[in-house]
Image: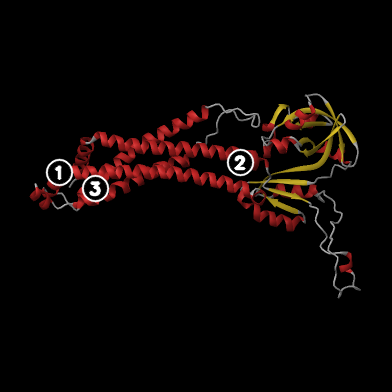
Amino acid sequence: MTKKLLIKISKALLLARWKQTLVAAIGVTFSIAMFISLLGFMGGLNNLLDGLMLNRTAHIRLYNDIEPSAKQPVELSEHFKHHYNFVSSVKPKKEQLNIYNSAAIMRNLKKDERVKGVAPKINTQVFFNVGVVDLNGMISGIDVDEESELFLFKDYVVKGNYHDLKTIPNSIILGKGAADKMLAQLGDNITLTTTQGNQFQLKVVGFYQSGIQELDKVQSYASIATAQKLLGESDLYITDIQIKLKDMNLAPAMAREFRRLYKTEAMDIQTANAQFETGSFVRTLISYAVGITLLIVAGFGIYNILNMMIYEKIDSIAILKATGFSGKDVNKIFTSIALSIGAFGGLLGLIFGLVFSLLIDLIPFNTASLPTVTTYPVDYNLYYYIIGAVFSVATTYLAGYFPSRKAATVDPVVIIRGK
């Protein structure tokens, strides 16, 4: 039979039970809308959490670590070479924490086409002197421009201007938690003591808030020059080289390469944040599982409706086959009915999914720990909409395929004789 005639018959059967058809379409619409809004919200949440941790973490970090001595001095002696050593207290050897020839290493890294950017850093422990109390703290000396470009440092400075670290000598941006403990205000001078026992005064030019409360109680920032001055070191002193890659997935292999090449420790982001990535993966997996379950439930609804339609229209199917329609034609009729429900419901589901996502994105979300976030996070990834559209068509096709096979096998002689 011609396609035009088959489409006309499908439309007639579809509209004959329009209430059931509408219920099936609403089921698909609701499933797709919930699927998209759920994945969009969970995707936005994962991006937010990734921003708190992964975007502030170097893809590869070069540094020198304090490690225990591999061998005791007695093991190096030829006289005791064949003796058994009972000494078990292996102490760390004295090593410099700064990276040797750091300037040349950074120049070489910037020439690497796989590297997006390089930012030097100095980490040092200090004690903030607040009256008769000493508060434990950590100061990171940073290159302000590189840190802002590669690790979004400026987005976490909630008060003050991050550029003041570069232009004002002996300045500091305090962690919000540390500033609250010290009752510090912008423009105040604070006193701190280094681990070497030297005291310095630094001017507060801003407050930093990462969203991780325990970190903000101890972490503060200064320029590299100020950090070198605190340690009494030269302008070549660098303890960390932070590397941002164009492709984060290359980090483990490149970390091993840089470890051999530059004779330093190299930590890749996957190793440093393995548990965090696992949490993001599990959240995403749960979201997909719930969304796909909704689609499958909608598919069963369409399956039941088509089954009932075939049962009620068994006489019409028998007449169609008696007048020359083949089983294949009947199969196409009911399959097209299912696909029509899926396409119409899926299209509405995509629209309502976008609307729900926009509504979620407008809901206020204010918390002191996340000052840069004002509404609930939503990810408008086109990938979610493509998956929703494909699943709506695939699910409804399968839901209509099996009832249509049943309709195709109807024997018109048996039906007409029974009537």
* Residue lying at 35% horizontally and 42% vertically, measured from the top left: 298
Badge 1 crowding class, 10 Å Cα cut-off, few under 14, some 14 to 19, many 20 or more, is: few
Q: Residue at x 35, y 37 (%)?
A: 27
Return the mark for residue 316.
1
Q: Is residue 256 above or below residue 312?
A: below
**Residue 31 placement, left or right of 310:** right
Report which residue position mark 3 lands on: 332
Q: Secondary structure at mark 3?
A: helix
Amino acid type, label 2: Asp
Question: Horizontally, is 412 left or right of 192 in the view?
Answer: left
Q: Residues within 10 Å of mark 3 (few under 14, many from 20)?
A: many
Mark 3–mark 2 Cα distance, whole angstroms, equals 48 Å
The residue where tag 2 is placed is 50
Tell me what residue is drawn at x 88 percent, y 33 percent.
200
Q: Are marks 1 and 2 in contact (CB under 8 Å)?
A: no
Q: Position of residue 346 (x, y in %)?
A: 36, 38
Disc 1/disc 2 C-alpha distance (Å): 58 Å
Label 1 vs label 3, nearer the camera: 1
Viewed as shown, does residue 233 lie left or right of 173?
Answer: right
Residue 26 x %, y %: 34, 35
Q: What colour scheme was applied to this rendering of the protein?
A: secondary structure
